[in-house]
Structures are given as C-alpha cells and as structure tokens.
Amino acid sequence: MTTEKKAFYHLPGLFEFFDLYKVFIPLFREKREYFYDWCEIGSIYGAPADCLWGGGRVGFGDADPGEVRAFMEEYRISSRLTFSNSLIREEHLTDKRCNSLCALFEKSEGVKNGVIIYSDLLADHIKSCYPGFYLVSSTTKVLTDPADFKKELDREDFLYVVPDFRLNRDFSLLYSLSCGKKAKVEFLCNECCSLGCTDRKKCYENVSRKSLGEECEDHICTSPGAQRGYRFSDAMDNPCFIGTDDILNRYLPYGFSNFKIEGRSLGSAVILEMLLYYMTRPEYILKVREEIYLDSMLDLF
C-alpha cells in the first residue's frame, strides 16, 4: 500500500542498542525497497547507564556518546535524551555528566535533537542552558485524563506530548483535536501493561529513585501476567496496541503521524522483531533478519 502521509517512528535504545542500529539503519537506507514506503525513523531515544536525570527505565547503555552523536548526524536522525526523572530537585541540576551530554547533543550538524522530560524544573533548566533542544512531554506523566492531556498539548514548551497508552483508542477525543494539536501527539504503540493498572506512576517513580541513587525496594508489578515479563506477543493482545493496520487506517488518515515504540529494557533481538513488524515489508522480513543476524560485528541477545 502506498500513501502520501508518513508515519514517524521514535525507536528505543539510542545508547542501549546502538550496535543494532549501526547495522539496521544503513540497511534501512541502502535497501529502502525492503521497508514500507509510508514510514520513516523520526528519532531514537535513550540514556546511558547511571544517568541521574534518567527515568522511565533504568538505563544500561554503554555506547560512547561521541560516537553515537556522530552516527546520528551522519544519517540525519534526531537523537532524544531520555531525562524523564520525575523527582529532580534543584541540587540535581548541576550534575556534570548529564549537563555534558546536553552540551554534546544540543548542537548537532544538520539535525535537531530533543529531550524527553517529566520535571518542569529540569525543563526550565534545559530551556535556559540548552535552547537548541526540542522538548517531549514524557509518557511517565501518565496522562490518562482527557482534560489533563489537552492542557499538556496547549503547553508551548513541548513539541510532542506522549499520552498514557490508555488514551490510544479514545477516538472521540483524538479526532476532535485541531490539526496543530494532532501533530504534537506521539502514541505509545506497544505497551503490554494492564489497562486496569493503578500503580503505573509508582512504577516510574521507583525508577526515578534508583536513577538518583536512592535506596529503595524494587517495585513489584501486580498486573496479570507480570511474572512473564515483557513479551511483544502480549503487547499485541493489549486492547490499546497500535499495529500497522491501525496506523494506516485509523491514525494517518486523521492527521496523526508520530508513534513511539517502547523497549529500552529489552534485548536487541526483541527490538529487531519490532523493527521487522513495524517497518519491514513481509516479503523481505527473512532477508532483513538474515542481514542482521549474520553480521559478524553484532551480538544479538
């Protein structure tokens, strides 16, 4: 199917799965016929390990930031620093490592980079010290109330707003938005968390505390099936899952074009399956999988 409208995917693992993207992105550009013509890579997001401002997931990325920036510049893809810690205090704003990352990624040649953010305090710091970034309102805010979501869309600070996945199917709300507001919405496509979960914000706060180095017990998820861990197949069964047919038939035609794929805490082999599903033409899936798996420089797990 060919469409004039483009879906822009925002992919996980800027630092965490850099080795995978070093193989996948050149393939995506050089063998474009393998992939859907209606999709592009809008950005890749993530944070290195032990990042004080980090949130959402505990980061484990160990890729060299300078190499990451150079690669992303070469392919003109936006980098997003995931600095969505919800518990930032004034004393955290001087963190040397996070400020150094901002200084490095703020001024990339030929591409504008972003920061995914929760804290208004940190947002003010980024706007003041690193005005070259665009800001993304993080899904860790758990915006499930339509009124709160609309207020967030009204904020000029944010170029994009990622609502809670439970608003994905509220089409009466979504279709009523203006064209400008629709352009700001970025949907979280592949969450497998239970629709009835009431602990989502507590889960994110637990990650924020760990990122700050605070002593705290692990958050124990009580959602049905939580003991299985994340499985893409389970995400596909979630009532709020957004698949490729949904993108083509229910979102793109109504003015929505930004779609976030989660998975920073998963393995690169799982991320590859998501790239195959969301971006790769079915008849070329085996070719792409072979290209990736047979690359001698890449250790998938």
Image (tube, grey):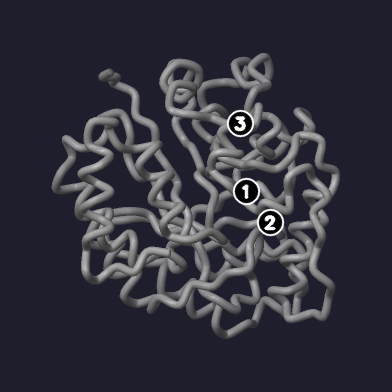
Q: Is residue 248 above or below residue 107?
A: above
Q: Position of residue 188 (x, y in %)?
A: 58, 40
Residue located beneath label 1 in the image: 137
Q: Earlier in the sequence, mark 2 or mark 3?
A: 2
- Under circle 3, the secondary element is helix
155 vs 142, nearest the viewer: 142
Residue at screen point 79% across, 32% down: 145
- Marks 3 and 1 sit apart, C-alpha to C-alpha, by 26 Å
Q: Earlier in the sequence, mark 3 or mark 1?
A: 1
- Marks 2 and 3 sit apart, C-alpha to C-alpha, by 28 Å
Residue at screen point 37% across, 64% down: 300
Tag 2 near tag 1, CB within 8 Å: yes
State which quadrant residue 127 falls in.
Answer: bottom right
Residue located beneath label 2 in the image: 118
Q: Tag 1: residue type?
A: Ser
Residue located beneath label 3 in the image: 237
Q: Position of residue 125 (x, y in %)?
A: 63, 68
